[in-house]
Image: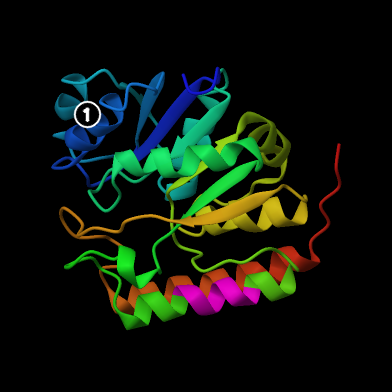
Amino acid sequence: MWNAKRIAVVLPTYNEHLSIADCIRGFESLGIVDDIVVVNNNAHPDTSPAVAATSAREIHESVQGYGAAIRCGLAATADADLVCVCEPDGTFAPEDLLKLLPFTGDHDIVYGSRTVQTHIFSGANMGRFLRYGNYAVAKLAEALYNTVYLSDVGCTYRVMSRRAIDDMTPVFRGIGSTFGFEIMLVAARRKHNFVQVPVGYHPRVGESSVTGNKVKAFALGLQMIFLCFRLRVARFVRA
């Protein structure tokens, strides 16, 4: 626990069998995480044996997509006060959770940001194309939603309060790669307090199925821009 709050970590996985055990052990070593949930999203067959050697519990989501996996993981951690979402591909350091947690006292959601140049490690997949693309879409969201400073719309490392998760879950729709950005936009529309904090960004273990390809990354960026405008005009009625 951390400050008397129960902490869960959700790790969605598809092609992270080479790095997931190290990621889990990194969170275990912090000594504050109560529950680590691996969401197997039709993952590589070597994934389950790797997870079995750790304290994490593995659940399965057959609907393919990042959003589908995260929504499954959030539902499976209903007893946690704070839920950390992180990719287990080696790009994020589990110890950076200690950077995010102090901000949860004042904010419903704490997002990581990978676009601060001094936090981008050599070999990380964050060249000018991705860095400035993320920054540009972040500024678009910042302007359209009249929200606080944003510098990265693609960082999936974050901590969310149970109150925010329960409030947003009924209006979630996405199941694909834009779901992380959807969370950010829904939170802005529903007036949750949030902040973005720089985190380290490291080289990925293995190749990404999305951002490892510039054409796919560009297409994802266009999807995010469309989502940004679409949700801006959508009706979000509070229960």
Q: Position of residue 190 (x, y in %)?
A: 77, 50
For label 1, the SS is helix
Q: Main secondary structure of the magenta part?
A: helix
How crowded pointer 1 is (Cα within 10 Å; few <14, some 14-19, many 20+) is rated as: some
167 sits left or right of 183 in the view: right
Q: Residue 19, position in %: x, y?
A: 17, 42
- Identified at 65% across, 43% down, the residue is 107
Three-letter code, disc 1: Arg
Query: Does the magenta run of residues contain 181?
Result: no
Residue 23 lies, in percent from the top left, at 24, 37
The reply to whether residue 22 is visible in this rendering is yes
- Frontmost residue, 35 versus 40: 35
Location of residue 106 by image quarter: top right
Q: Residue at x 63, y 30 (%)?
A: 162
Q: Quadrant of the C terminus?
A: top right
Q: How many marks?
A: 1
What span is colored magenta in the figure?
Answer: 134-140
Q: Position of residue 127 (x, y in %)?
A: 29, 77
- Whether residue 176 sits left or right of residue 239 in the image: it is left
